[in-house]
Image (tube, helix red, strand yellow):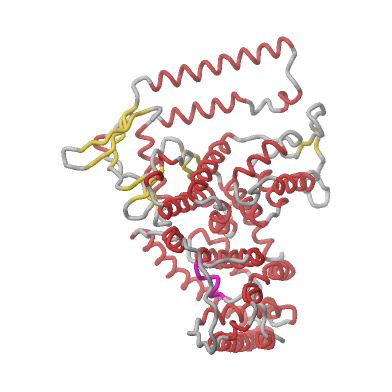
């Protein structure tokens, strides 16, 4: 509305349209404003040079002062007033998120549009202020999911998703408006942001610090000063690991700040506060121009979410897409890091890391029926919320693995699975050290059987929140014909890839001679043991064995003697 005015009209063909007309003096006003800022900044710099009054901090930050921000804003606004470019942006954004199925943009009526007039079909829907609570929550969640997917997967981000630019259509989809201001994100930045989201949820502040360093937000090398009177100094580099020695100290300071501020692991605004007020006085940070738009995007979304759900956690909503990016790196460094995390140089599984990860998440593994149910419809005891969160994370990982296996983005994952030394893996899975893993497999398989329950005693019905209707509507995700077709293709390719990889490893065992034959026998015996344990688990669940345990045991998935026996070596 600041650069143009929108009207409702009807074409000669009888189509309801929105007509966006640029203000006649928009370009001249913007040019004058930009020039005034540049002249004032030039005078300021001249005075500082003549009077030799430039501070050390200003010299260090010279490459990123207010002038660079003004230049970036002026460039972006110049693009924003080109309505032909905006029409292209709208289509590009819609196409980039077509796989979601619930994101759309207004259809441009090109025959009536020009550089200063943009005509689109009228959207049948409402803005946030006219929505019910459940519709508002649904729209907010879809907005966050769409923006996060664009940030870490497609790299094409809507930079101005305020309430006026979001609508909830009559068919349940979210409609984005106004594509003058967009931001493009490089692959290495997408990977850094994905790691930052995962690190924040896991409270792994060292990983969050690395992500900020890789994205250019924190200087490389890391610079520090105790107070504003000191000069910036670096910590140096570890000669063995090559890691910046300032990383650990900065991670500690970040942890203190995030724990001190309210909503440290749930609100993006809390992170922005810590970076700006707690850390920047002592740690040298730069704000790359692209980061300004991204910060604006997520602070805006978080503000909208707070109106419909005060407990909204933006990181949890973003987690599935961050996980998909983590499992599908695109940069050379990301691919190397991903492979080294899973495989050794000889292509053997990183067993110690895998077992450590399993131990960390073991408490969250239980009957998968609890995980696949809508978590918002179940009242979660605060004592076990962390364990449920771990279980949900495992569900996200499994879903991401399944999706990527049949998609073009999953080529790195497929190559890792292809190169894996399956003979060594089978041997390790049959060992005593793998009991926790076999136990988890039994519990997951037993829950997946989902046999009907037979009750021999009365049980207290678990209370559910009165907002069940709200939650159920908020969790609904409409699916377009295009996204449905894409998922069907992925499912088809996932099955094909699975059998190809399985056949590849089977032939590898045959070629390995007696060692491969022994591995196949071990795998067959292992499958029998897990299947038997799963059946026992399912039968016990059927006859209500789960009801005998305490509620806390139920939540954390305490292992039964039958499970332990079936998983034992």
Looking at the image, residue 104 sits to the left or right of residue 537; the answer is left
Q: Nearer the viewer, residue 550 or 396?
A: 550
Q: Decide whether residue 372 is among the magenta residues.
A: yes
Rendered residue at 67%/57% (across/down): 202
Q: Decide whether residue 203 is among the magenta residues.
A: no
How many badges with numbers are in the image?
Answer: 0
Q: Decide if residue 332 is in sight here.
A: no
Q: Could you tell me which quadrant the N terminus lies in?
A: top left
Please tell me whether residue 408 is drawn above or below residue 154 in the rendered image.
below
Q: Nearer the viewer, residue 413 or 64?
A: 64
Looking at the image, residue 384 sits to the left or right of residue 10; the answer is right
| Residue 419 pos. (x, y %) | 62, 69
Q: Could you tell me which quadrant the C terminus lies in?
A: bottom right
| Residue 201 pos. (x, y %) | 64, 55
| Residue 269 pos. (x, y %) | 60, 43
Q: Nearer the viewer, residue 205 or 496?
A: 205
Tell me which corner region of the image, top left, top right, bottom left or bottom right, holds residue 568.
bottom right
Task: Please state the extent of the stretch shown in magenta in the rendering.
Answer: 368-374
Rendered residue at 52%/50% (across/down): 148
């Amino acid at each position: 509305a600041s650069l143009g005015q929108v009207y409702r009209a009807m074409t000669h063909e009888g189509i309801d349209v929105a007509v966006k007309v640029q203000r006649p003096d928009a370009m001249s006003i913007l040019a004058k404003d930009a020039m005034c800022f540049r002249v004032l900044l030039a005078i300021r710099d001249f005075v500082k040079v003549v009077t030799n009054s430039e501070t050390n901090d200003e010299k260090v930050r010279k490459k990123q002062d207010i002038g660079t921000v003004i230049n970036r804003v002026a460039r972006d606004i110049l693009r924003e007033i080109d309505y032909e470019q905006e029409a292209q942006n709208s289509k590009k954004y819609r196409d980039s998120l077509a796989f979601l199925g619930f994101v759309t943009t207004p259809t441009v009526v090109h025959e009536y549009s020009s550089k200063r007039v943009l005509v689109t079909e009228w959207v049948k829907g409402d803005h946030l202020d006219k929505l019910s609570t459940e519709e508002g929550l649904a729209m907010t969640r879809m907005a966050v999911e769409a923006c996060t997917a664009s940030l870490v997967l497609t790299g094409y981000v809507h930079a101005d998703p305020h309430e006026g630019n979001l609508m909830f259509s009559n068919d349940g989809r979210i409609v984005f408006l106004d594509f003058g201001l967009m931001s493009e994100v490089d692959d290495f930045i997408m990977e850094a942001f994905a790691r930052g989201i995962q690190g924040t949820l896991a409270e792994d502040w060292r990983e969050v610090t690395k992500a900020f360093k890789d994205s250019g937000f924190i200087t490389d090398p890391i610079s520090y000063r105790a107070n504003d009177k000191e000069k910036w100094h670096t910590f140096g580099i570890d000669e063995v690991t090559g890691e910046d020695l300032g990383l650990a100290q900065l991670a500690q300071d970040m942890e203190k700040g995030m724990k001190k501020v309210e909503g440290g692991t749930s609100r993006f605004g809390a992170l922005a506060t810590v970076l700006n007020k707690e850390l920047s006085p002592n740690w040298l940070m730069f704000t790359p121009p692209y980061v300004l738009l991204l910060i604006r995007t997520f602070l805006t979304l978080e503000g909208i979410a707070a109106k419909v759900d005060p407990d909204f956690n933006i990181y949890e909503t973003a987690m599935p897409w961050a996980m998909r990016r983590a499992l599908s790196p695109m940069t050379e460094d990301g691919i190397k890091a991903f492979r080294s995390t899973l495989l050794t140089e000889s292509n053997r599984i990183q067993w110690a890391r895998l077992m450590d990860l399993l131990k960390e998440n073991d408490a969250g593994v239980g009957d998968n029926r609890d995980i696949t149910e809508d978590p918002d419809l179940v009242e979660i005891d605060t004592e076990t919320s962390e364990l449920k969160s771990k279980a949900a994370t495992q569900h996200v990982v499994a879903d991401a693995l399944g999706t990527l296996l049949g998609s073009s983005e999953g080529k790195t994952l497929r190559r890792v699975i292809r190169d894996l030394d399956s003979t060594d893996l089978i041997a390790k899975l049959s060992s005593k050290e793998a009991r926790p893993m076999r136990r988890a497999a039994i519990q997951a398989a037993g829950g997946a059987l989902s046999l009907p329950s037979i009750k021999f005693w009365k049980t207290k019905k678990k209370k559910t929140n009165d907002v069940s209707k709200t939650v159920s509507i908020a969790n609904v995700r409409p699916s377009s014909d295009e996204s449905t077709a894409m998922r069907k293709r992925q499912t088809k390719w996932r099955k094909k890839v699975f059998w190809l990889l399985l056949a590849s490893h089977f032939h590898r065992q045959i070629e390995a001679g007696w060692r491969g034959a022994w591995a196949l026998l071990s795998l067959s015996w292992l499958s029998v043991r897990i299947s038997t344990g799963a059946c026992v688990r399912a039968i016990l669940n059927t006859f209500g064995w789960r009801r005998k345990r305490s509620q806390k045991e139920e939540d954390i998935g305490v292992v039964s003697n039958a499970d332990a026996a079936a998983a034992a070596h």
